Amino acid sequence: MITVKNISHTFRIGKKGSEKKVPVLKNISFTINKGEIASIVGKSGSGKSTLLNIVAGFLKPEQGSIEMQGKETTNLSESDYAKFRSENMGFIFQNFQLMPGLTAFENIELPLKIQGMGKNARFKTVEKIIKKVGLDAVSDHYSNELSGGQQQRVAIARALVTNPPIILADEPTGNLDSETEQEILSLIKLLNDTMDITFIIITHDEEVANIAHQKFLMHDGVLKEAIPSAV
């Protein structure tokens, strides 16, 4: 489903003409099969978030190619990639990124509004996802009325609501306590098992990384090794 070939990228720091080149990604290649969970583990500054941004199409690599859903994506225009993201990807962030003025239900509903889905269809779709992630009792609550775990469940439901085949998660348990982290990891595994969603998870946490079918280690912009998981 996802094939990354020879991706390299450099950041340029300073004024033009005297700028310093900082290699961030160095010839990265890997393949993730449909329905797998893949984790990319590394310390801050290792290049893992830059790689996720390139896979998501928020950043164009200097060289290399990425194929997803049978489409070569690295040469897509900004508008075409935005359409591709809308149809094929969901996102989960460390800080949840919920809209504070919206209820849990309305936050989850938002991507469907952007896609132009009708009100009745939106309601049925959101209700189904809310039950799947266990938010029935708090769907009318605002984000400041929710626990960290509940907020992340809302974020996961929002990522799921458009039924994307791929979900990209950046430190999805980074702001959670250990007990809540386990609940979220169990939910991700359940969604992977029951919905056949492909996950790419960026993390520095070995416990999070170990739920994956494939575990990749990033160090100084290099994919150092791929360790088959026990999952």
Image: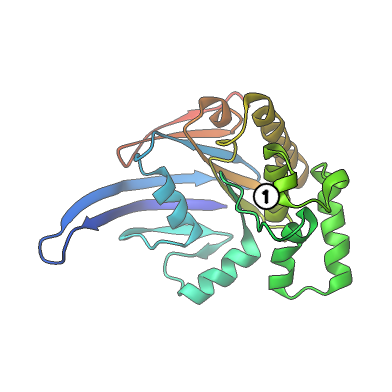
Q: Is residue 97 left or right of residue 64?
A: right
Number of marks present in the image shown: 1
- Dot 1 corresponds to which residue? 155
Badge 1 marks a residue whose secondary structure is helix
Spot occupied by residue 86 in the image (x, y as percentages of width and height): 62, 66
Determine the image quadrant of residue 213: top right
Q: Is residue 109 left or right of residue 9?
A: right
Spot occupied by residue 97 in the image (x, y as percentages of width and height): 60, 53
- Seen from the viewer's position, the closer of residues 28 and 174 is 174
Residue at (40, 59) in percent of width and height: 65
Q: Is residue 22 left or right of residue 5?
A: left
The image's colouring method is rainbow
Position of the C terminus by quadrant: top right
Mark 1, Cα crowd under 10 Å, few <14 / some 14-19 / many 20+, is many
Residue at (67, 28) in percent of width and height: 182
Spot occupied by residue 101 in the image (x, y as percentages of width and height): 70, 60
In this rendering, the answer to whether 226 lies above or below 62 is above
The three-letter code of the residue at mark 1 reads Ala
Residue at (60, 45) in percent of width and height: 199
Asked whether residue 180 appears in the rendered view, the answer is yes
- Seen from the viewer's position, the closer of residues 47 and 231 is 47
- Seen from the viewer's position, the closer of residues 206 and 166 is 206
Asked whether residue 196 appears in the rendered view, the answer is no
Q: Is residue 81 left or right of residue 165?
A: left
Extreme residue toward the left, this view: 18
Residue at (48, 64) in percent of width and height: 72
In this rendering, the answer to whether 61 lies above or below 34 is below
